[in-house]
Amino acid sequence: MSESSRNALIDGAKALACTAIVWHHLAFYGPLSDTLHAAAPGLSDWLVRYARMAVQVFLVLGGYLAAASLAPHGNARQRRPWGRIAGRFERLVVPYAAALVIVVLVDALVRPWLADPAMVSADPGLWQLLAHALLLQGVLGQESLSAGVWYVAIDFQLFAFSTLGLVGVHWLALWTRGRMGWHWHGPLTLAQLLTVALAALSLLGFNRESRWDAWAVYFFGAYGLGMLAYWGAHAGSARRAWLWAGLIAGLTALALALDWRARILLAGLTALLLVLALRVPQAARWCDWAPLRLLGRISYSVFLVHFAVCLLVNALVASLWPESVPVAIAGMALAYGLSIAAGCLLYVAVEHQRPTWRSSLRWQAGLLGAGLATALLA
């Protein structure tokens, strides 16, 4: 399969997962969600309960892309691991901080008209703002400034954890070869074995305990399955591809037998589908549709900014047409469309630009300034 076809499949999966997350939040937060539940309780309950699991698709895709960047042939690219981690932080935090500036300002704007503590945050404090600027809000137990931004912190943790783990095992192999003359021979590289072991540890242990859900180890099961999916999709032979698919299926089945979790089932199926679809040229054709590919490319920006749009639309509709079911449903559709438009603007203006430490610090400072200013002016 060509690189263009692979990208179409990845973009299509991102677009669908992004859409599910936006509609989950529309069905979960604000007065519009109450109106939808009254009019269509079945649809509302499905969006609340199941659409949120689309985050597992992002986790698997994140692992897939991490393997492509860090160890495409099964051995870690050991050059500049700290530079890679710093680069990942910059790419994540610049659009993230920019979106949080928007969320903080919108939050302050709608607070007098939207009395919903689940959707409208209190004035942010300095410690809360600093924790968000450094992607430490979950670890430090700070209330989130926006729905879903916990994922950005987890994504950074997962990438850093994977980078250090893969490079560490590579250096260990070099050391044992130089000191003891020992050299590993096997169907998997040591880096791949480490990934399988860590994914199993997460799926069978950490992911079953919610107290770990602010840390990478809780989510590494799905992320690791994505890394296995990359090595399976790019295996040199069909036999090796089936080996990787078998490992994914076996880990998923074992995890579900030990403790049934629908989110892990979705992660396992996503990883298996990636292996199969990316080895079949015809499989990506259904995703090769320009609007879907565009949404996939801007999905991170849409994910970041959509909550601010949902806040505005909820405040407007709740103030002018609080009892109208048709207007509420139209408002939700409008919020989805405006989220894509706002995400496209954020992508072009911020995310698509080359990130630097200077731009990162500028937006982090902007987040602190916006948060403190709204608190002082309240």
Image (cartoon, rainbow, N blue to C red):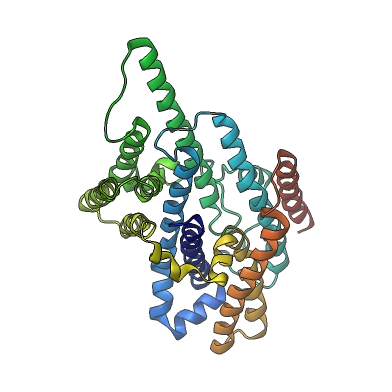
Residue 372, how many percent across, how many down? 74, 50
Q: Residue at x 71, y 51 (%)?
A: 353
**Whether residue 134 is visible:** no
Residue 316, how many percent across, how many down? 67, 78
Residue placed most toward the observer, 1 or 354: 1
Residue placed most toward the observer, 27 or 229: 229
Q: Residue at x 53, y 67 (%)?
A: 22
Classify 40 as above or below 373: below
Classify 357 as above or below 232: above
Quadrant where the C terminus sits is bottom right
Residue reaching furthest top? 179
Residue 36, how many percent across, how many down? 49, 81
Q: Residue at x 58, y 44 (%)?
A: 135
Query: How many numbered callouts?
Result: 0
Does residue 235 appear left or right of residue 93 in this picture?
A: left
Residue 39, how many percent across, how many down? 46, 86
Q: Quadrant of residue 177?
A: top left
Does residue 183 appear left or right of residue 302 in this picture?
A: left
Classify 290 as above or below 151: below
